């Protein structure tokens, strides 16, 4: 029987417009029936958003035709395909769990094969929307006001080309200028603020701890998108092949280079960040506690995907018969070998 395998990575932070998120990023590696990557081939995909369960109601379905790269990697934005069922913009991300079902035809036709159903652990803007919804059980905004916790405020002055933040700890407003041609949008996390100045090729973060704005330059041809997590910010510069993380504990930006041929996507969890470099066959994790990037090599024939939870990351290398976990408490990768005939899948269990 013919089999088709795909390695799936679902990531936040793909914005199609400056105001409303219309898509999120998706990566997969397509394999043929012999288990080899489909290099530089035309494949077609049918992607469905399911409600509440892996076999739940289909809320939205779209199709896309893509060309894989030399490693068989496919990059696309879910929400930008040809819709066949439902409306992507009408999906209520704030209720119930959401699952993504992926079907693929490696020949580029419409003979789709189901290659997996995965839960979206966090959906585009859902956590932010829940954060600012004062009626939500997960909201902290109401507690911040009622219990007199510190509350910072910020806004963009597009005419004077300045971003302003009021720091409740110092009781002062702090301004940061930006290019007059830029139209930045503030993003927030744990009292910190950040924005991208695409014209000056700089990312700015206001640190609640230091009460100052800290800048990080990037390649002028890049168009990075900020990812937030527990007061930290991160982005990818695909032109300079570097990942940047602002650590709110240290108040500095930390950089990690990757292979220029790679197109990695950042995954975040509890202030830590990670990505896979398929060309250099390494997984990188940034640990807020140590303020450093830690690498873990894997087999060049493997195509692992990251699992995240509570600041930790994990993946399975089926070719080397090893499972790896990045432990945020120790700041190290720890491996566990398994039988070479096995093909295990990681199962996640969270505890307090």
Image: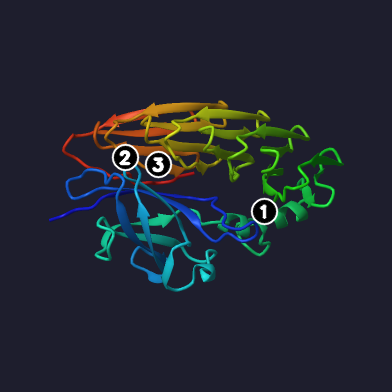
Is residue 33 found left or right of 225 in the rendered image?
left
Location of mark 1 (residue) = 140
Q: Residue at x 18, y 34 (%)?
A: 340
Q: CA distance from mark 2 to mark 3?
A: 10 Å
Is residue 291 found left or right of 57 in the rendered image?
right
The quadrant where residue 129 appears: bottom right
> Against 84, is 119 above or below?
above
Image depth: mark 1 or mark 3 in front: 3
Image depth: mark 2 or mark 1 in front: 2
The quadrant where residue 351 appears: top left
Q: Residue at x 64, y 41 (%)?
A: 231
Q: Secondary structure at mark 3?
A: loop
Closer to us: 216 or 312: 216
Residue 67 appears anywhere in the view: yes
Q: Secondary structure at mark 2?
A: loop
Colour setting: rainbow
Residue 275, x across and y down, in percent: 45, 37
Label 1 crowding class (10 Å Cα cut-off): few <14, some 14-19, many 20+?
some
Q: Residue at x 61, y 42 (%)?
A: 230
Residue 113, x across and y down, in percent: 25, 61
Location of mark 2 (residue) = 303
Where is the N terminus found, in terms of image quarters?
bottom left
Closer to us: 176 or 173: 176
Does the residue at mark 2 contact the one at mark 3 (Cβ under 8 Å)?
Answer: no
Is residue 115 found left or right of 144 in the rendered image?
left
Residue 266, x across and y down, in percent: 49, 41
Residue 306: numbered disc: 3
Label 2 crowding class (10 Å Cα cut-off): few <14, some 14-19, many 20+?
many
Q: Secondary structure at mark 1?
A: loop
């Amino acid at each position: 029987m013919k089999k088709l395998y795909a390695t799936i990575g679902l990531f936040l932070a793909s914005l199609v417009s400056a105001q409303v998120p219309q898509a999120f990023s998706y990566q997969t590696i397509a394999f043929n029936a012999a288990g080899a990557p489909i290099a530089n081939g035309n494949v077609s995909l049918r992607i469905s958003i399911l409600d509440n369960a892996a076999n739940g109601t289909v809320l939205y379905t779209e199709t896309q035709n893509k060309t894989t790269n030399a490693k068989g990697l496919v990059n696309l934005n879910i929400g930008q395909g040809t819709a066949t069922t439902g409306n992507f913009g009408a999906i209520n991300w704030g209720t119930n769990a959401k699952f993504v079902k992926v079907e693929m035809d490696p020949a580029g036709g419409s003979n789709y094969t189901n290659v997996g159903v995965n839960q979206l652990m966090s959906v585009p803007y859902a956590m932010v929307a829940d954060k600012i919804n004062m009626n939500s059980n997960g909201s902290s905004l109401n507690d911040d006001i009622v219990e007199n916790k510190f509350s910072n405020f910020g806004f963009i002055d597009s005419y004077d080309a300045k971003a302003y933040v009021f720091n409740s700890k110092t009781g002062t407003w702090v301004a940061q200028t930006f290019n007059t041609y830029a139209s930045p949008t503030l993003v927030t996390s744990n009292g910190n603020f950040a924005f991208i100045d695409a014209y000056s090729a700089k990312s700015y973060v206001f640190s609640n701890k230091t009460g100052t704005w800290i800048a990080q330059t990037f390649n002028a041809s890049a168009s990075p998108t900020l990812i937030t997590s527990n007061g930290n910010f991160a982005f990818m510069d695909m032109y300079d092949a570097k990942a940047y993380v602002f650590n709110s504990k240290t108040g500095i930006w930390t950089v990690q280079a990757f292979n220029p041929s790679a197109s990695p996507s950042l995954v975040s969890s509890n202030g830590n960040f990670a990505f896979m470099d398929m060309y250099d066959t390494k997984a990188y994790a940034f640990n807020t506690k140590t303020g450093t990037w830690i690498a873990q090599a894997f087999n060049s024939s493997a195509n692992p995907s990251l699992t995240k939870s509570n600041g930790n990351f994990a993946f399975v290398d089926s070719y080397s018969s090893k499972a790896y976990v990045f432990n945020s408490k120790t700041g190290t990768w720890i491996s566990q070998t398994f039988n070479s005939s096995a093909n295990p899948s990681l199962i996640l269990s969270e505890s307090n």
